[in-house]
């Protein structure tokens, strides 16, 4: 038997009660509390609520959401009632946080609320794209198909982001190694060279003097370097969360050398893929543009799509509204125009997304291939500079002795 700390409301007195209950699982603990006349508000395994590891372990990942969505879609498609489908998925869910959220959703559904409304109470888990697709599925009576599209959308978006992160991981690791080598040599090798020259009372070359000065500063004021680094990272993270900081970073992504085409194609792929999924589910054009603009996750591109949406609201075709806009790649309005003429805008957006996703794969491979020799050159220059700054004065010293 496990101990669970709970917070519940007494049905009789309406008072909030906090105590401990013993049960085999959280679900069993909830049943015990309900039998005792309490409405559970929160239930946690004793000693886990303050554990950082536990909080990280119970974070709802993209994989958790995809598995949950697919299972729910399959059960609803098999003809099970919504409440029963949710309870079945709940029994198969291992993530504690997601379990708690699903329990709340079940309570809302049994209380007469729509699934989209129940999901909408948890925006940190179910974003606007998810809610729009579920709402459209409810309205059209095709909730299972809508959930399948949600899962497919999440899988493709996660796959794209995983590839981008994978391409950026290698250079970051190499740069960290270079930094580690620099610090190691500054702290261990350079002080020995400085001591040698000090004993011999010889004048050091300028480069070696700079290295020794930097080494002494790092050794004597390492705590200051660490403090400045931590504070700098903290303030950068806080700044990036502000409107100005977020905007500046988004502009940087769209214009940074080497990677700008990568980011622009990523945003376009995300925009047209989301638009295709929404339109195929029955979401109205203006709602599709509004939700897709937010789903792009770039303030600048969002503003461009919002301006196009205003033109659509005024009666213009979507292809004309997007044509010539900054950061909207030419293929997007061209393919949408074909879709408008054939009455298959969603299909054309899907094909456009596939093209950009394929191009992203190729560009990521090309960048990964090109960046390896560049990093090797950087590593060689840094290491060579360090070795030269250390060995050159030693050779000079040997020559002076001779």
Image: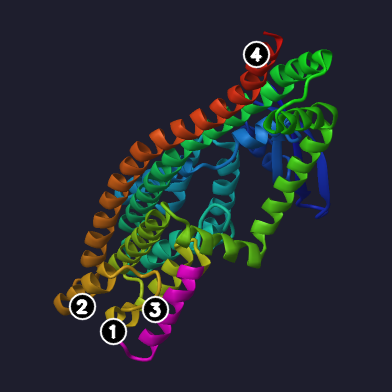
Counting from the top left corner in percent of width and height, residue 371 is at 40, 39
Q: Quadrant of the N terminus?
A: top right
Precedes in sequence: disc 2 or disc 4:
2
Precedes in sequence: disc 2 or disc 3:
3
* Residue range (magenta): 300-317
Residue 157 or residue 113, whichever sits in front: 157
| Number of disc labels | 4
Precedes in sequence: disc 4 or disc 3:
3
Q: Is residue 102 left or right of residue 391?
A: left
Residue under numbered circle 1: 317
Instruction: Check the image and name the residue furthest to the top.
Output: 402
* Quadrant in the rendering for residue 270: bottom left
Would you call the spot at circle 4 few (<14 residues within 10 Å), some (14-19), or many (20 or more)?
few
Residue under numbered circle 4: 399
Which mark is in front, 1 or 3?
1
Q: CA distance from mark 1 to mark 3?
A: 12 Å
* Quadrant in the rendering for residue 180: top right
SS state under label 1? loop
Residue under numbered circle 3: 286
Precedes in sequence: disc 1 or disc 4:
1
Residue 350 or residue 333, whichever sits in front: 333
Q: Is residue 92 visible?
A: no
Residue 36 forms part of the magenta stretch: no
Q: Is 229 located above or below residue 344 in the figure?
A: above
Q: CA distance from mark 4 to mark 3?
A: 79 Å
* Quadrant in the rendering for residue 352: bottom left
SS state under label 3? helix
Which mark is in front, 2 or 4?
4
Q: Any mark on residue 340, and which?
A: 2
Would you call the spot at circle 1 few (<14 residues within 10 Å), some (14-19), or many (20 or more)?
some
Q: Is residue 348 left or right of residue 260?
A: left
Counting from the top left corner in percent of width and height, residue 396 is at 66, 18
């Amino acid at each position: 038997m496990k101990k669970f700390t709970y917070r519940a409301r007494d049905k009789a007195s309406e008072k909030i009660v906090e105590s401990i209950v013993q049960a085999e699982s959280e679900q069993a603990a909830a049943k015990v509390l309900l039998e005792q006349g309490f409405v559970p508000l929160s239930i946690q395994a004793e000693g886990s609520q303050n554990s950082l590891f536990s909080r990280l372990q119970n974070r709802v990942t993209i994989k958790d959401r995809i598995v949950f969505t697919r299972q729910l879609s399959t059960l609803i498609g098999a003809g099970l009632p919504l409440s029963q489908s949710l309870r079945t998925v709940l029994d198969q869910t291992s993530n504690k946080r997601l379990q708690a959220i699903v329990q709340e959703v079940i309570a809302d559904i049994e209380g007469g609320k729509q699934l989209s409304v129940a999901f909408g109470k948890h925006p940190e888990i179910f974003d606007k794209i998810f809610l729009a697709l579920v709402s459209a599925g409810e309205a059209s009576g095709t909730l299972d198909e809508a959930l399948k599209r949600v899962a497919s959308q999440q899988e493709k978006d996660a796959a794209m982001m995983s590839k981008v992160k994978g391409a950026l991981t290698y250079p970051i690791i190499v740069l960290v190694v270079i930094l580690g080598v620099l610090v190691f040599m500054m702290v261990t090798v350079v002080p020995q060279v400085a001591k040698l020259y000090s004993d011999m009372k010889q004048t050091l070359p300028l480069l070696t003097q700079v290295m020794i000065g930097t080494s002494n500063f790092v050794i004597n004021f390492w705590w200051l370097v660490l403090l400045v680094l931590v504070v700098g990272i903290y303030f950068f993270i806080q700044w990036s969360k502000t409107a100005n900081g977020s905007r500046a970073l988004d502009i940087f992504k769209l214009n940074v050398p080497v990677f700008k085409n990568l980011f622009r194609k990523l945003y376009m792929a995300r925009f047209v893929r989301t638009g295709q999924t929404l339109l195929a589910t029955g979401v109205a054009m203006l709602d599709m543009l509004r939700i897709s603009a937010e789903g792009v996750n770039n303030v600048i591109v969002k503003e461009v799509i919002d301006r196009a949406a205003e033109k659509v609201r005024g009666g213009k075709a979507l292809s004309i509204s997007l044509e010539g806009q900054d950061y909207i790649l030419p293929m997007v309005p061209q393919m949408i125009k074909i879709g408008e003429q054939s009455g298959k805008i969603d299909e054309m957006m899907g094909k456009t997304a596939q093209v950009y996703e394929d191009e992203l794969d190729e560009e990521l491979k090309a960048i990964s291939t090109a960046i390896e020799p560049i990093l090797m050159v950087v590593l060689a220059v840094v290491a060579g500079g360090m070795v030269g700054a250390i060995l050159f004065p030693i050779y000079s010293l040997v020559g002076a002795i001779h």
